Amino acid sequence: MLCKNGKKKKHKQILMVGNWLRDYGFWAEVVKEILRTRNDIEFTVIAGNDVQKEIRKSFKYSVPLKIKMLSGISDEELRDTYAQSDLLFLPLIDAWANNALLEASSMGVPVMVTDLPAVREYLSDDLPIFFTNDSAKATADQLQIILTDEDGLEKRGKALRMRIENEFSWEKIVERHLNLYNKLNSPE
């Protein structure tokens, strides 16, 4: 991946966002697996203080320097963090609606997420990269392999952005609501 100045980035940037229904225990195990052998991958977590305490505990209160934790950031900082990320890695316990998935996708950030029906429903079956939360080693290996396919990641990110624009833009939502209201108002 390239930086904004056109130079190749030295590190891959993996993002984790949110608090509700996130599996930070599994996330920490995957990160530990990766950091055992890699120094070219960095992680950013955007989450509340309670989650950050949980992460510190997972690392026995010695969080590696390759993990940056953010909380209470502005909308602009959030946007910039998405823009600088190579991948959203999102282990979930469960899901219904998930702003982090929509935000990352709308920014063209490829998504690697726990395989759940709600995620497939609004991101599709083929655009995100799915995993199950049963083997940290297997997921860490999968993540590292995925990061080597920069063209594939870029294509996934662009396709996710197009899906979000086509399905969830305000114009599309208004259009669907108006169609529904018209159906409800029309005599049969």
Image: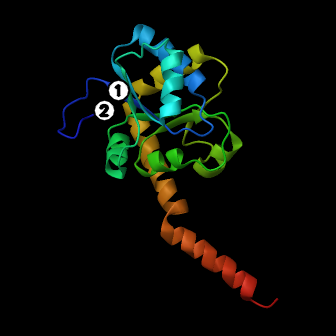
In this view, 101 is above or below 129? below
Between 16 and 170, the one nearer to me in the picture:
16
Q: Secondary structure at mark 1?
A: strand
**Quadrant of the snapshot with the C terminus:** bottom right
Residue toward you, 90 or 67: 67
What residue occupies the far right of the structure in this picture? 188
Few, some or many C-alpha atoms within 10 Å of disc 1 (few <14, some 14-19, many ≥20)?
A: some
- In this view, which residue lies farthest toward the top? 36
- How far across and down, in percent of the image, does residue 88 sit? 46, 36
71 and 21: which is toward the camera: 71
The answer to which of marks 2 and 1 sits earlier in the sequence is 2
Residue sitting at x 56%, y 69%: 173
Mark linked to residue 12: 1
Contact check, label 2 and label 1, Cβ < 8 Å = yes
- For the residue marked with disc 2, what is the amino acid? Met
Tell me residue 165's x, y (percent). Answer: 47, 60
Query: Is residue 56 left or right of 83 when viewed as pictured?
Result: right
Residue at numbered disc 2: 1
Q: Residues within 10 Å of mark 2 (few under 14, many from 20)?
A: many
The amino acid beneath tag 1 is Lys
